[in-house]
Image (cartoon, helix red, strand yellow):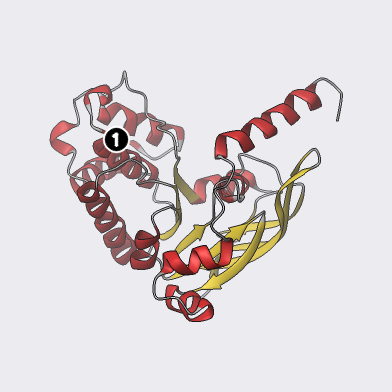
Amino acid sequence: MEDIIQVKNLVKRFGDFTAVDDISFNVKKGEIFAFLGPNGAGKSTTIKMLTTILAPTGGEITLNGNDAATDPDAVRHSFGIVFQDPSLDDELTAEENMEFHGVLYGVPTKLRRERIQQLMEFVELWDRRKSLVKEFSGGMKRRLEIARGLLHHPAVIFLDEPTLGLDPQTRNHMWSYLEELNRTEGITVFFTTHYMEEAERIAQRIAIIDHGKIIAMGTAQELKDKTGKESLEDAFLELTGRVIREEESSVTERMRAHGRMWRGGRR
């Protein structure tokens, strides 16, 4: 099976802080791939580079045959994304959020309307299409974000901790939708999560990043065999240690501080 994501020697530095340190990996077309790591390990920074939000300091990214450095627009049209933080417009209806996304991506009107109904029915929100998003529960918003991310028929969907804060029933339903889409449409799923049982159950392959480097990769069973542990969570702790890590927000603040210094001419 061909690779849909190819990452070679990827590096991202913020001043003297290296967030991603010379990582290389491939994701197969149609694969469900988990990208795991402790807080501040480099997961979100990597996703931001894969989705062209951040420019790498070094290395190469190819997504769906397109080079992220030389053809970022083609790369952007190849993926959908569900961010950690909500990104819907609460003052619009569910259907208006979908419409706005479809127009931005240039989906033809007839196809856009058909696709909106198909996806909203799939995530069981079609009957709430005229409701304002601010009236939705967290689980409903997540389902709408997934439907929106799939509207332009991307080859890859990126999910950055998509089930954070959701109850087990909603998490289970959400993954059922995604697994069905993976089966029926062949979409590649690239996700991060802190729920190890989720990754063990869903992912076909897993990469673990720590301190900006990929320290292990393989199936859940291969990672358990490598560490001699019975669960992926125990394998993860064996590989990354049990010390509580710096929160993602602290790492983000370092990046913002570097940005302020850069803009002020003090690199």
Seen in the image, is 135 located left or right of residue 70? Answer: left
Query: Residue 45 or 99: which is nearer the viewer?
Result: 45
The residue labelled by disc 1 is 141
Residue in the picture at 39% in, 71% down: 231
Quarter of the image where one finds residue 261: top right
Quarter of the image where one finds residue 207: bottom right
Q: Residue furthest right?
A: 266
Amino acid type indicated by mark 1: Lys
Q: Residue furthest left?
A: 127
Q: Residue furthest front?
A: 243
Q: Position of residue 249 (x, y in %)?
A: 56, 34
Whether residue 31 can be seen here: no
Residue in the picture at 61% in, 49% down: 42
Mark 1 residue crowding within 10 angstroms, few (<14) / some (14–19) / many (20+): many
Seen in the image, is 260 located left or right of residue 180? Answer: right
Seen in the image, is 256 located left or right of residue 87? Answer: right
Q: Position of residue 266 (x, y in %)?
A: 86, 25
* Quarter placement of the C terminus: top right
Whether residue 151 can be seen here: yes
Query: Residue 13 or 143: which is nearer the viewer?
Result: 13
Q: How many marks?
A: 1
Compared with residue 65, is residue 161 higher up or lower down, i.e. above or below? above
Q: Position of residue 70 (x, y in %)?
A: 71, 49
